[in-house]
Amino acid sequence: MGLADQVVVLEFADERSVVQTRFATTQLALLRAHLGEDLSGAVADAGRALAEPLPAEAQEAEQIAFLGTGWSYGLAREAALKMREASRSWTEAYPAMEYRHGPISIAGPGRVTWMLGAAPAGLREQVEAAGGAFLESGLDPMAELIRAQRVAVARAHARGLDPDEPMHLTRSVILNSPS
């Protein structure tokens, strides 16, 4: 930090959990604010994401595919990663239009397609026609990520897992140097 011209210290975003959730969200909020976005709607939506009941179909699903468009595709990947890490669940992430091209074939009973952001027209109908559940809340995609993180914790607890200490993971990756 001493060599940098400018420093943004995010010490408040440090976490004890191996499954890091606050830091990525904090960085994205900082970027969006820096780009001039008014985040008051996202903040209000985050409150709703924390208060609303969790979707039962996501808690019980055999498989969850997270989807996004544009920048929310990155959040879909983050949601899938946190779900895998915290609850050892089968999750995947795709750009919404790519999902239609082939991966939609995994949609079916007991499986959830979870959209972060606005879904392309007709996608809900395609997923439901395949027998899958389709989740789309209308919340800001960052707030929808919070809902996904809450589901990951609920799924972990239901399986008797500790979502903060996932199997085979450490908080940091340390590479051994060759001898």
Image (cartoon, rainbow, N blue to C red):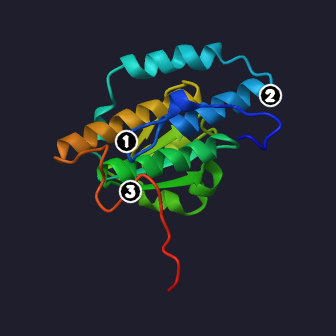
Q: Residue furthest right?
A: 5
Q: Position of residue 110 (x, y in %)?
A: 29, 49
Q: Which residue is mark 1?
A: 17
User: Which amino acid lies under the numbered mark 1 shown in the image of this protein?
Assistant: Ser
- What residue is at 37 percent from the left and 52 percent from the top? 85
Res. 131 visible in picture: no
Of the pair 50 and 173, the residue shown nearer to us: 173
Q: Position of residue 77 (x, y in %)?
A: 54, 50
Work out whether mark 3 precedes mark 2 in sequence or the reverse, and give the earlier one.
2
Q: Is residue 144 left or right of residue 166?
A: right
Residue for point 46% across, 16% down? 47
Quarter of the image holding residue 151?
top left
Q: Nearer the viewer, residue 59 or 165?
A: 165
The residue pinned by badge 3 equals 170
Asked if 28 appears above or below 45 in the picture, the reply is below
Pick the residue in front: 9 or 58. 9
Q: Type of residue at label 3? A: Thr
Residue under numbered circle 2: 35
